Amino acid sequence: MKDLRSYLASLKAELPDELVEIEAEVDPLWEVCAIAQKFEEKNQYPVLYFKKPKGSRFPLVMNLFASRRRCAHMLGASPENAAASYTQRLGRKGDTVYIEPAESPVKQVIRKGEEVDLFSLPIVTHHAWDAGPYLTAGMATMRWQAEGHAYNTGLYRCYVKERKRMGIFLSVGKHNWHMVRENSAKGEATRVAIWIGHHPEVYFGAQAKNPFFHDDYSATSGFIGEPLRLTASETWGRDFLVPADAEIVIEGIIPADVKEVEAPFGEYTRYYGEQRYGPVVEVAAMTHRREPIYQDIFVAHPDNQIFGAFPIEDKVFKAVQEVVPNVKSVYLPLSGCCRFFCYISIGKRIEGEGKLALTAAIPVDSRVKYFVVVDEDIDVFNEAEVLWAIATRTKMPDDLVIVTNTIGEALDPMAEGEHLVNKMGIDATRPLAPFPERVSIPKDVLDRIALEDFIPAGKLARVATEK
């Protein structure tokens, strides 16, 4: 059985240096994020486990996804092959299993109506100008009203306004946005369950970009390689199931005709999202484990950005593979918030394949704006290599593709009007005609040379590392 606790136990046993437990009392109002940023400034991204968050008796964990190396370890892969492993897992089929409420850990404590108090949780205020405390690791689950009533899950920020009332931001065009819009047009409220704290693999599976009306619970089972355990909700019974092994589940409705001010909030772009009117969640029930672990995602930092990159990398890889079968790697770097830049490597066979890859990749995700296609000898995970390819293998404007006034991302600070942006692709693959070879040292020499054989270990340890 996979849950957050089993993951933390395995992390402590297998990668103890990746987990930092903090015994001192720390305030969720900015202090926990300040500690995470202090580590980040040292280029360190451990999982942080706060045992005594101020104002709550429940511990808080954050930074689970802040390291691509650790995310890859979760997926049983190397950092370079993590996206490929993610793609392979998405191809699995899976079934869920029903667990009676009495046997479900998330049902150990049940609060309904006036008993609900969201402020009993150590909800974090992340940035100086944030409107207030936000749930950032809450997976919002809704059900389609047609096509078999499939479940849809997505990671959505929730602004905790009152003891049992939240604002929720739904990105334009995403599945849950469509669901709420369709229900509201009929004057109907939308049921929603927001679950917090689960095994990282469950989070990865639940946030995958599946087709409309695809059941995300079943897809998550396939992704994690075992049945996702579900149980009846308190509010709607077996007509609406929730993860039995989550730490916390918040149940409520999104009314059809209610809009309230939401934001500002520091988003993955590293800018504050503008204040706007948005839907609200009226909370009816909250269930949790006897001593739940509250999970937070440090938005606008690698914890948030890396986690969101894998589904986009998967979509781009599949789209390019349809037209260029010899695609090798796809990478969304931190320099573009793991959303706006996309680097693609291909084994180029004929002229024009670089631009063909671009035309397939550009429409895949509204958030990605800048694409670079390189040859397979370029390491897309090394931005210096990608920039070198642009510098030495492109002829402008011949190798440039530009698409203007296309649908972008509502959170993009450069989007205009109805979220319109311009997109650009660069074909940085080398011509197949005679072209200079890149310099190299003979591989057998590199393989047999070890610095330790020539330089004392103490001296090696003192050599400065460039950041």
Image (cartoon, helix red, strand yellow):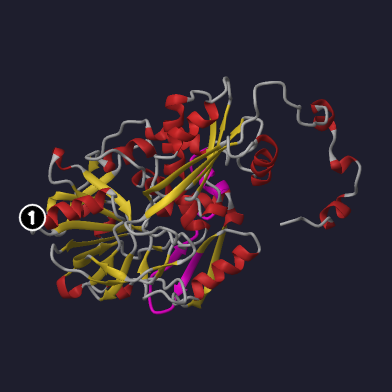
Q: Which corner quadrant of the image does residue 442 belong to?
A: top right
- As helix, strand or loop, the secondary structure at mark 1 comes to loop
Q: Position of residue 86 (x, y in %)?
A: 45, 37
Q: Which corner quadrant of the image does residue 354 belong to?
A: top right
Q: Which corner quadrant of the image does residue 335 belong to?
A: bottom right
**Which residue corresponds to mark 1?**
186
Q: Residue at x 57, y 47 (%)?
A: 69
Q: Residue at x 84, y 38 (%)?
A: 450
Magenta includes 65?
yes
From this view, report whether residue 300 is shown above or below residue 319: below
Q: Residue furthest front?
A: 397
Q: 201 left or right of 156?
A: right
Q: 212 left or right of 446?
A: left
Q: Position of residue 282 (x, y in %)?
A: 18, 68
Q: 392 left or right of 142?
A: right
Foreground: 276 or 124? 276
Q: Residue at x 54, y 25 (%)?
A: 352
From this view, report whether residue 10 is shown above or below residue 164: above
Residue extent of the magenta highlight: 49-76
| Residue 191 makes an appearance in the image | yes
From this view, report whether residue 352 is shown above or below residue 187: above
Q: Position of residue 333 (x, y in %)?
A: 55, 48
